[in-house]
Image (cartoon, helix red, strand yellow):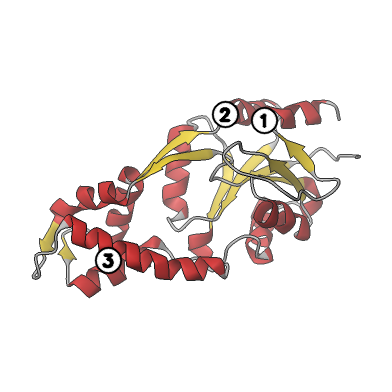
Amino acid sequence: MQLTKPKMVIFDAGRTLMNYKEINIRKGIEAYFPYIISNPHNYSIEEIEKQDDEIFGIFDLCRENRFEIPVKNKLRLLFDLLEIQLSISLDEVAKIEWEEDPVIEAVNHAAELLHWFIEKKIKTAVISNIDYSGTLLKEKLKEIYPENQFEFVIASSDYGVMKPNRYIFQAGIVKSGLEAKDIWYVGDKVAVDVLGSKAAGMTPVLYKNPRNTYQEIPENAIVVDDLMEIASLLTQQ
């Protein structure tokens, strides 16, 4: 396959740059619980968690149809239903949840690849399906990869549409100031990342995260088992 060296590489976030080791809703609720200033029905942490689970399930239906509802909306519905008031804003509650709920670690060799791109003066960016805001995602990526030089970070929650919807990829193309053919997109899911970015005109790269299972992979797709293989491919160009 003849490859064209990219001017920019855009990454997915979850399971491409970040692995979620643990997701524990209870930890997030415990962290914001002290900020509750009105709880007329005396709901316990356990009762709030149960209602949170039910609401999250409703929002999952939106995701199945490729629409993203910001986590702030979920929190607003949760607190209004329970008649709970807090001394902090919904944005601050979302940040507390994001910091306390999931345990996140860097994907193997992602830091090395990002450093290699900096050395080679290849631009990088992120487009991710996530219900937390792009601002929080950008902060987390900076925490995990302090030297990153992402040109932009796009979260589906900020637009309301999710990959593989072509508009979210096209927004990235517009932000890049480049043509789609000059961009590689790296992600861990075939239907969402590979097919979506290919339809937008980018060159897709499938990163086979060991936490995923893969069945049908499109012919002629660029497939890597380790992120640093991307650097090897580009070195050969």
Q: CA distance from mark 1 to mark 3?
A: 40 Å
Mark 2 vs mark 3, CA separation in Å: 36 Å
Q: Secondary structure at mark 3?
A: helix
Is residue 18 in sight in this rendering? Answer: yes
* Vertical order, 177 against 22 (above or below): below
Which badge, 2 or 1, comes first in the chain's sequence? Answer: 2
Amino acid under label 2? Asn
Q: Are marks 2 and 1 in contact (CB under 8 Å)?
A: yes
Quickly name the residue at label 2: 108
Within 10 Å of disc 3 (Cα), the crowding (few <14, some 14-19, many 20+) is some
* 102 vs 230: above or below: below
Amino acid type of the residue tagged 1 in the rendering? Asp
Tell me which residue sits at (47%, 45%) in the image.
Answer: 138
Judged left or right of residue 38, residue 177 is right
Dot 1: element? loop
Mark 1 — residue? 226
Name the residue tied to disc 3. Answer: 51
Residue at point 52% right, 66% down? Answer: 63
Assign a secondary structure to mark 2.
loop
The extreme right residue here reads 2
Q: x and y percent of residue 203 in the render?
A: 78, 48
**CA distance for labels 2 and 1:** 8 Å
Q: Amino acid at mark 3?
A: Gln
Pair 2/3: label in front: 3
